[in-house]
Amino acid sequence: MQTKLTKNRISKKAASFTESVIREMTREAVKYGAVNLGQGFPDFAAPEDIKQKAQEAIAADHNQYAITWGVKSFRDAIVEKTKWFLNLDVDAETEITVTCGSTEGMIAGMMATVDAGEEVVVFEPFYENYAPDAILSDAVPVHVPLYQTSDGWHFEKEELRAAFNERTKAIIICNPNNPTGKVFSREELEFIADLCKEFDAICFTDEIYEHIIYDLGFEDRKLKTEDQRPKHICMAQIDGMRERTVVVNSLSKTYSVTGWRVGYVIALPDITSAIRKVHDFLTVGAANPLQHAGAYALGLPESYYAELQSEYQSKRDFIVPVLQAAGFKCEMPQGAYYVMTDISDFGFKDDIEFTKHLIREIGVAVVPGSSFYHDKSLGSQKVRFCFCKKDETLAAAAERLQKIKSKI
Ligand code: GLN
């Protein structure tokens, strides 16, 4: 007997968002043999010593479930690192949850804190995961635009203030920012902090690019006074914000191991306890041996971060002029490893058509700008390039991009 299917087999939540466009672009790049400047992952080798530690951890049989909220030595390393880098005291027993990447950290954090119908403020353009994160946690996203000017991306204070009200549960920031490369200044963070305090809201801060900030040598930071240093400031460092900030971080970008899926969340004990419950039933835990390797990675000396920063700075300094010469309008990003570009001079209907052309005819994959906006029309003349790639990959992309004007 044939059964009749009368019910919707797909939930309204799952039906209301698409698969990741960023990840789809990687599949397209492979299909058409394009140089992949789309999805933000390194195409160079992860550090040998970190890989070695992971192999040793497997050999030493750290192969069963770790403690749900994270291997003790890894949580201890997070405490140490957070102390020297951010000068914040964190308790390994009650304030840290190790997650399957920052992706799980963010969604577990939101599911643990947000009730249906509560509002979450999101700057736009935003990293595409935050939209499904809001849907899956039943949050109502409220978008506040970031405007591009010749000295970077900025928000209008009045627009941000107008986005807050008594239903506001949280704001999400990504700092340094994906996709714009914006680094939030102390003044901006303080303005956001004051709103969080006034409206009793939480700040989720995605900090995965904390070490990828340009125009400063790591040595310079040490020599200059606090005010002179153009350095990364974490929202949890702002007065009164430690108790209302959920810091989401990961090994992925800082140690070039995006496939390991090891992240962590730092929050006060009441929030951490809720996050740990959600995390437990979503995933049980992150990969045990990789957390052991993470304990080693977080203990690397400051010189490691100085080198990482300077390598990305030289990649940025190479690719941005190449893009400008090819006809993309863009500015130097202040942090992270992306460049949002304006494509309006190429005369394409929209970013999707342009991206198809770029992948298939020119051989370079990017991410269409619309995937970073809730109103797709806002990103329809933008595409995002990433430059966390080998120098030869960037050089190959540069060569291909020279053809762009003649092929339109
Ligand atoms: N954060 C990276 C990006 O924006 C990779 C995202 C992902 O695929 N997890 O491209």
Image: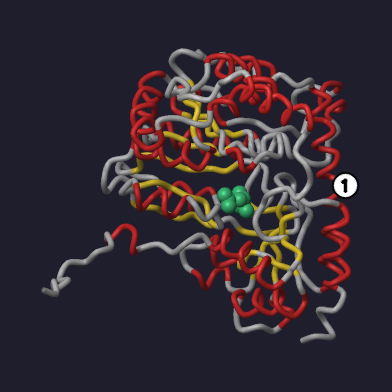
Among the 4 quarters of the image, the one containing residue 111:
top left
Q: Quadrant of the N terminus?
A: bottom left
**Towards the viewer: 86 or 14:** 14
Which residue is most to the front? 1
**Towards the viewer: 43 or 304:** 43
Q: What amino acid does circle 1 point to?
A: Ser
Among the 4 quarters of the image, the one containing residue 219:
top right
Q: Which residue is mark 1?
A: 314
Image location (x, y in percent) of residue 391 = 87, 53
Rendering colour mode: secondary structure
**Towards the viewer: 37 or 156:** 37
Residue that appears at 80% across and 85% down: 407
- How many marks the image carries: the answer is 1
Determine the secondary structure under disc 1.
helix
Query: In the picture shown, does residue 80 fall above or below 314?
Result: above
Count residues near mark 1 (Cα–Cα under 10 Å), then give few for <14, some for 14-19, many for 20+. Answer: few
Q: Quadrant of the C terminus?
A: bottom right
Which residue is most to the left? 1
Query: In the picture shown, does residue 82 fall above or below 152?
Result: above
Whether residue 241 is visible: no
Image location (x, y in percent) of residue 326 = 84, 72
Residue that appears at 54% across and 54% down: 126
Residue that appears at 68% across and 22% down: 56
Image location (x, y in percent) of residue 306 = 83, 30
Residue 191 appears left or right of 325: left
Does the beta carbon at disc 1 come under 8 Å from ligand 1?
no
Whether residue 168 is visible: yes
Image location (x, y in percent) of residue 233 = 65, 31
**Towards the viewer: 312 or 10:** 10
